[in-house]
Amino acid sequence: MMIILLFATITTFAQETFKGEHFIEVSGVATLEIDADELYLFVRLKEFEENKTKVTLEKIDSDFLNALKNAGIDKKNLTISSAGSSLSKFGRKGKDAFREKSYELKLSTAAQLETFLEKLEPVKVDQVSLTRVSHSNIEKLRLDLKVKALQAAQAKAQALLQGIGSSVGKALMVREWEQEFQPMHLASNIMLKGANAEMAGGIADQGMEQTEFKKLKLRAQITAQFEIK
């Protein structure tokens, strides 16, 4: 009895799934490489001791903002990531604590980044790092790429069906796959140490050897079913 019920269930499912329509299922892929126009930097300022005297956060912050101005970068591109007091060494409390402040800075070109780093060189910041990159029109670019991937799927279906004397009809199903977004990388890692340069083994002196970037790579894949006419 159980076997009969199981067979009946499978038969019903098959009848509901395949209704006699003749279709072809194909996938289309489209890719695009673009230059990023949004570069996001993490900048951390931190108090430190120099000649047994603490260099205050206010002094470091003022020097940093002047470097930003000298680089011709609008202050509106700067947002505070975090600010406050933290212990840089175990046991430090109150006025002996080394305070720190973090910013996120948005730039638009590699040239602008290079100018900023040049003006920042005299400022003893604790850390500067490139955190992410993007494009100001990324959502539209992704949508356009999906359309091209669907068109590629339709063209593939048409080419295949012509070989058997048939043609493509209406789309019966369209499914999109997750789009790949490969971030841009620096040719040499951007990581500057200011106040702790000696402890960091001279990383600050190395700076960034060259400002070269790989392109952003976008990829869209669409799977579609088309009626066979």
Image (cartoon, rainbow, N blue to C red):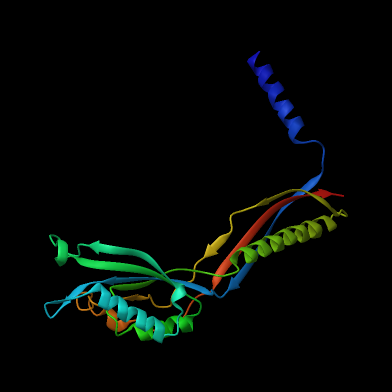
Residue that sits furthest to the top in the current view:
1
Along the line of sight, which residue is nearer the eye, 21 or 180? 180
Along the line of sight, which residue is nearer the eye, 74 or 124? 74
Q: Position of residue 102 (x, y in %)?
A: 34, 68
Along the line of sight, which residue is nearer the eye, 2 or 39? 39
Q: Is residue 68 left or right of residue 126?
A: right
Q: Position of residue 105 (x, y in %)?
A: 42, 72
- Which residue is at 73% across, 62% downward? 152
Along the line of sight, which residue is nearer the eye, 143 or 165? 143
- Which residue is at 84% across, 58% downward? 162
Dividing the picture into quadrants, the one containing residue 11 is top right
Q: Position of residue 52 (x, y in %)?
A: 11, 77
Instruction: Check the picture and name the quadrant holding the N terminus.
Output: top right
- Which residue is at 56% across, 60% downward? 180
Q: Position of residue 92 (x, y in %)?
A: 14, 62
Count of numbered tags: 0
Q: Is residue 70 above or below residue 164?
A: below
- The answer to whether residue 148 is visible is yes
Q: Is residue 108 above or below residue 71?
A: above
Q: Is residue 92 left or right of residue 215?
A: left
Q: Is residue 49 above or below residue 118?
A: above
Dividing the picture into quadrants, the one containing residue 115 is bottom left
- The answer to whether residue 193 is visible is no
